[in-house]
């Protein structure tokens, strides 16, 4: 390989500058200076030169946005300054009250920062609230060092590998000759979002590939950012900076508007629709005008954020634990339209719950044409008195699944038909079971109790007693969930398979809704275990329509990948009633592996935070059920990882005698509370379970130990008394 000549060096520099400038023109100025084809040509030329002269490659080169290696897993990074949420309102008066409160707070005190009777009013930044995914970018000496998602606000996922692929995010900041200096440390917060046309393209491509469609641009953006492989990040995501995290020097900027102007000069995109306004009326004018303007932007917004412009004002007001007092979001109500209800289809969900789905005349709302909407449950249909043939008002809340809000009774045709809930499962014809709304059951029970008491008292005193109006009886209001109780119902099975492969569960991307339907219909999937046997059925798969070798490879690779998600995701994927992702995490963290969980009795389960008695019963019921045991056996045989890595920091010292041991505690302990000891042992690497079995390594028996001790002795499990335990615990 030849030493790069001065000419080559100069060309490489020139190409990099040009490409950065094109990015800036496109994303910051919204005024592209070249066609996409020309941009790609320049990028390829640079790639070729860097390949020929590896000595010239640098990490900040525009070529380094693509082609990074996939990461093994996400690292959690704490936010130096928490990423809070924003308080919001839909109401002008509430917004006005926030403004007045703010003026008052700033005018108070000796060192009043604002004179409440100032004619101009308080200076505010008025910004579109972009419906995307929040991101914190850290630049050190002008270089992008880290990109972190919001996460829970105090810590998020490191997604630097993906952020680097976004052309809207500069890898290196630009020091404008006439601009302010770039701070040594600059944490910029902003929104990554997907323009509507990109969203449309993504879903068209997914449809062609037989993948599940994304619900909306925000979900699609979030999906992109959580890719491990940066090559899978959607091209065309955009970014607007709208806030700050840690900045050094801390006094680099005095106002929000000054900071945004500086960020722009550094090459960071900011929303051109942002304005600085003075006083409430000007802010309200902005909001009203923006409600019109936002329809033409080509990306989703759901409100306007008002922020105090002066940083000393912001600092004076501070934050609550959830959100800053110096800003507020005014949200626009979800769009509502009317259409005609033609049919109501009962749908069987993954738990057997039967819900009514509205079929309507197609109507355009919040960006797409819809024909189906949710009616929640049959109780609600009865309460709202919605009938077939009615004109109904629908709303797309959060731009996701539209909901039927109400019927326009004034437009009701004479022959409008009442909607009756099904008596039998629409798919397997098993008679449905009714589960009443627990709130209503409790309401009725407490009414009856109260009446009984009052009547008894009245009898004692000999007074007349007329009980007050009882709540409506359950059957009359029909406020109940209907279930198909048949665990082998084909509809439930299909929904369970879809859930199992879903993004937040086992995340088998190529096994989306359509593919599950196709494989079930072809007789290739009759249960979760079958997913892991698909690799034996390649010939049958190849016979299916739209199933090429590439898709099958994808599918099988995705299934293989899914085996290593860990216990929490496995539990979340199994449709155990009451158990969602947080419950699954709590169980997995507490027990560390499936065997330890299998050994836990209901009481032990109920003691866990996030679980409680109802969920504990449901979990134990699942673990003891025939279908539950079957699926767990199948997962084990398929080599699915049924352990959960314990959180970092809790890792045990390597020489702990408890590392990896399954321990049961019994009897009365003198020196410990049971739960405290369990925590201590877990911190030392043990998993503590509730009952003795052949998987138990050690029983710690206090005074008055009973049946657990007897069982341990019978099974030959090692038994320690408290004295021995005290000797083995580190100081
Ligand atoms: S300021 C402390 N400005 O809305 C508050 N947020 O609902 C910092 N968002 O997590 C956020 N556009 O992701 C701010 N112009 C804007 C915004 C904006 C969208 C998002 C942001 C935040 C969420 C809160």
Image (cartoon, helix red, strand yellow):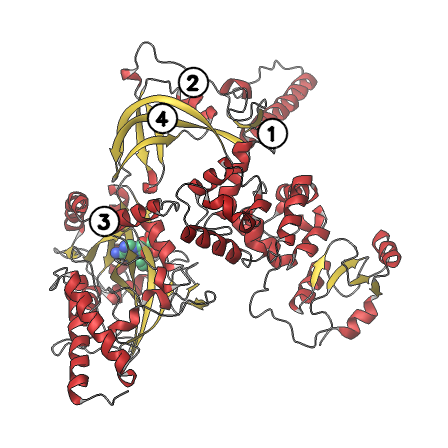
Query: N-terminal of the two: label 2 or label 1?
Result: 2
Query: N-terminal of the two: label 1 or label 3?
Result: 3
Quarter location, residue 457: top right
Give the crowd class for mark 2: few <14, some 14-19, many >=20 residues within 10 Å: some
Q: Give the structural element (helix, strand or loop) at label 2.
A: loop
The answer to whether mark 4 and mark 3 are in CB contact below 8 A is: no
Residue 422's place in the image compared with 274, above or below, is above
Q: Label 2 to label 1, Cα distance in Å? A: 22 Å
> Which disc is residue 333 wearing?
none
Q: Which residue is mark 4?
A: 359
Q: Which residue is mark 1?
A: 485
Query: N-terminal of the two: label 3 or label 2?
Result: 3
Residue 553's place in the image compared with 210, above or below, is below
Give the crowd class for mark 1: few <14, some 14-19, many >=20 residues within 10 Å: some
Side (left or right) of 341 relative to 627: left
Q: Which residue is mark 2?
A: 419
Q: Which residue is mark 3?
A: 197
Q: Label 4 to label 1, Cα distance in Å? A: 26 Å
Side (left or right) of 45 relative to 590: left
The mark closer to the camera, 3 or 2, is 3
Q: Label 2 to label 4, Cα distance in Å? A: 13 Å
Query: N-terminal of the two: label 4 or label 3?
Result: 3
**Residue for point 38% across, 65% down:** 159
Decide if residue 319 is in sight here: no
Q: Give the structural element (helix, strand or loop) at label 1.
A: loop
The x and y percentages for residue 571 are 58, 50
Picture quarter with ligand 1: bottom left
């Amino acid at each position: 390989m030849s030493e790069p000549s001065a000419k080559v060096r100069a060309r490489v520099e020139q190409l990099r500058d040009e490409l950065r400038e094109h990015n800036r023109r496109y994303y910051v100025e919204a005024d592209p200076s070249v066609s996409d084809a020309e941009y790609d040509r320049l990028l390829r030329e640079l790639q070729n030169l860097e390949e020929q002269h590896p000595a010239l490659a640098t990490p900040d080169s525009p070529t380094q946005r693509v082609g990074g290696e996939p990461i093994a897993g996400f690292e959690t990074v704490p936010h130096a300054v928490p990423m809070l949420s924003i308080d919001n309102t839909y109401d002008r008066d509430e917004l006005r009250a926030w403004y007045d409160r703010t003026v008052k707070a700033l005018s108070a005190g000796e060192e009043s920062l604002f004179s409440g009777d100032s004619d101009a009013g308080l200076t505010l930044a008025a910004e579109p609230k972009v419906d995307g995914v929040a991101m914190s970018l850290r630049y050190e000496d002008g270089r992008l060092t880290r990109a972190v998602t919001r996460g829970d606000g105090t810590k998020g996922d490191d997604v630097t590998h993906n952020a680097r692929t976004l052309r809207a995010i500069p890898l290196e900041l630009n020091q404008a000759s006439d601009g302010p200096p770039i701070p040594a440390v600059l944490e910029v917060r902003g929104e990554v979002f997907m323009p509507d046309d990109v969203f449309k393209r993504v879903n068209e491509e997914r449809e062609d590939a037989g993948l599940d469609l994304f619900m909306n641009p925000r979900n699609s953006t979030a999906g992109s950012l959580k890719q491990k492989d940066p090559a899978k990040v959607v091209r065309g995501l955009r970014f607007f900076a709208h806030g700050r995290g840690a900045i050094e020097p801390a006094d680099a900027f005095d106002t929000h508007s000054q900071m945004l102007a500086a960020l722009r000069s550094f090459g960071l995109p900011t929303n051109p629709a942002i304005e600085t306004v003075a006083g409430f009326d000007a802010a309200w004018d902005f909001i009203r005008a923006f409600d019109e303007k936002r329809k033409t932007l080509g990306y989703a917004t759901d409100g306007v954020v008002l922020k105090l412009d002066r940083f000393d004002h912001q600092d004076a007001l501070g934050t609550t634990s959830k959100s800053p007092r110096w800003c507020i979001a005014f949200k626009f109500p979800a769009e509502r339209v009317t259409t005609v209800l033609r049919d109501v289809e009962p749908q069987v969900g993954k738990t057997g719950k039967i819900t009514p789905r509205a079929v309507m005349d197609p109507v355009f709302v919040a960006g797409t044409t819809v024909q189906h909407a949710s009616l929640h449950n049959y109780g609600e249909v009865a309460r709202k008195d919605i009938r077939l043939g009615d004109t109904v008002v629908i709303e797309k809340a959060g731009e996701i699944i539209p909901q039927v809000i109400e019927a326009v009774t004034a437009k009701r045709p004479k022959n409008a038909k009442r909607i009756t809930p099904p008596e039998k499962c629409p798919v397997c014809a098993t008679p449905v079971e009714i589960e009443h709304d627990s709130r209503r059951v409790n309401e009725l029970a407490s009414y009856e109790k109260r009446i009984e008491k009052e009547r008894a008292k009245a009898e004692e005193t000999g007074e007349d007693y007329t009980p007050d109006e009882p709540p409506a009886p359950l059957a009359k209001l029909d406020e109940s969930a209907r279930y198909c109780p048949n665990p082998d119902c084909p509809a439930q099975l299909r929904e369970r398979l879809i859930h199992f492969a879903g993004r937040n569960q086992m995340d088998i991307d190529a096994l989306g809704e359509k593919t599950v339907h196709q494989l079930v219909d072809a007789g290739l999937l009759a249960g979760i275990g079958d997913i892991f046997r698909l690799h034996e059925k390649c010939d049958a798969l190849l016979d299916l329509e739209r199933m090429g070798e590439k898709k099958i490879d994808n599918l099988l690779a995705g299934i293989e990948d899914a085996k290593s998600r860990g216990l929490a995701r496995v539990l979340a994927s199994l449709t155990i009633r009451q158990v969602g992702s947080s419950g699954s995490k709590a169980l997995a963290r507490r027990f560390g592996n499936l065997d330890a969980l299998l050994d836990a009795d209901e009481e032990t389960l109920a003691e866990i935070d996030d679980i409680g008695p109802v969920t504990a019963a449901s979990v134990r019921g699942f673990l003891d059920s025939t279908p539950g045991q079957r699926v767990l056996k199948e997962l084990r045989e398929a080599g699915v990882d049924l352990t959960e890595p314990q959180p970092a920091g809790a890792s045990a010292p390597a020489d702990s005698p408890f590392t990896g041991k399954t321990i049961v505690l019994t009897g009365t302990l003198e020196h410990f509370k049971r739960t405290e000891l369990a925590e201590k042992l877990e911190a030392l690497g043990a998993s503590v379970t509730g009952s003795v079995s052949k998987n138990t390594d050690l029983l710690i028996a206090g005074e008055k130990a009973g049946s657990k001790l007897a069982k341990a002795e019978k099974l030959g499990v090692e038994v320690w008394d408290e004295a021995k335990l005290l000797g083995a615990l580190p100081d």
